[in-house]
Each structure stands twice: as structure tokens, then as C-alpha cells.
Image (cartoon, rainbow, N blue to C red):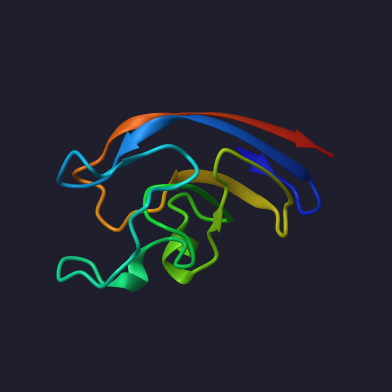
Amino acid sequence: MQVVAGDLISFTASGQVHFGPDQRSTCGPDRSHWLLHPSPISPYGQYPVKNIRAGGLVACIDQVSDCASHRQGRAFAVGAGKSIRAPITGMLHLGINDNLFTDNSGHFDVQVTVSR
């Protein structure tokens, strides 16, 4: 979804994702109880948002299709609900706060409202 700098973006989310190799790695959009830690597969720095726990709903606004800013630390936590002003014009991307996506399943249902 395209947003313009200054837009008010509101998120409401529900659902559940499985983000790890065992059944305990499950959470809703507000994050899991799992602390982030270094991993031999993916270093800690590859989590989109480092200051929240694993698995929660995150977003970024970028001017590229794959949101490379996730890897640059510009992603932000969304959780079950949040409103922000778009800091830049670009594409809004949603994802989960994880460092390895091949073992993920489930989904978040997210309603996004944009006001100009």
C-alpha cells in the first residue's frame, strides 16, 4: 500500500503465527515471550525490530519493493494496534519480527486505515 509522508496510518491486528522450530514459538501480533538472542543461523542484527520480542507484527515504509529497511533498523513495532504518522512517502510493508522465515506459518489479520 502506498502512503504519503504525513499520512496518519492506523493498524488493528489479530491472529496467530508460528515463528520457530517448536510448538512454543507461537504468538499474536503483540509478540511472544521469547527474548531475541544471537543465533548461528541468523545474527541478532537481522531481526527487523531489535527492541521488542520475537514474533510480533512489524511494519516499515520504504521506497523499494522488499523493504530492505527492515535490515537497516527502520522497521517499527505495530502489535495489535497502533497509529503513526508516515515519516516518508513510500510503500507500507507488514511482517513479523523474526530472523528466519522458512519455518513460519499462520497469519495476522490486519486492518490498515490511512487518513490524509
Q: Is residue 114 above or below residue 92?
A: above
Q: Is residue 111 above or below residue 6?
A: above
Q: Residue furthest right?
A: 116
Query: Would residue 55 be found to the left or right of residue 80 on screen?
Result: left
Q: Is residue 12 above or below residue 38?
A: above
**Residue at left offset 74%, top offset 36%:** 114
Q: Nearer the viewer, residue 86 or 111?
A: 111
Task: Residue 7: give x, y in percent of width and height.
Answer: 79, 46
Task: Residue 28: give x, y in percent of width and height.
Answer: 43, 37
Task: Residue 75: give x, y in percent of width and height.
Answer: 53, 59
Q: Quadrant of the C terminus?
A: top right
**Residue at left offset 57%, top offset 56%:** 63
Q: Quadrant of the N terminus?
A: top right
**Residue at left offset 57%, top offset 47%:** 78
Query: Would residue 77 be found to the left or right of residue 115 on screen?
Result: left
Query: Would residue 93 be found to the left or right of residue 115 on screen?
Result: left
Q: Nearer the viewer, residue 91 or 13?
A: 13
Query: Would residue 28 be found to the left or right of residue 78 on screen?
Result: left
Q: Nearer the viewer, residue 15 or 94?
A: 15
Q: Nearer the viewer, residue 1 or 101?
A: 101
Instruction: Tally the numbered discs.
Output: 0
Task: Residue 107: give x, y in percent of width and height.
Answer: 38, 30
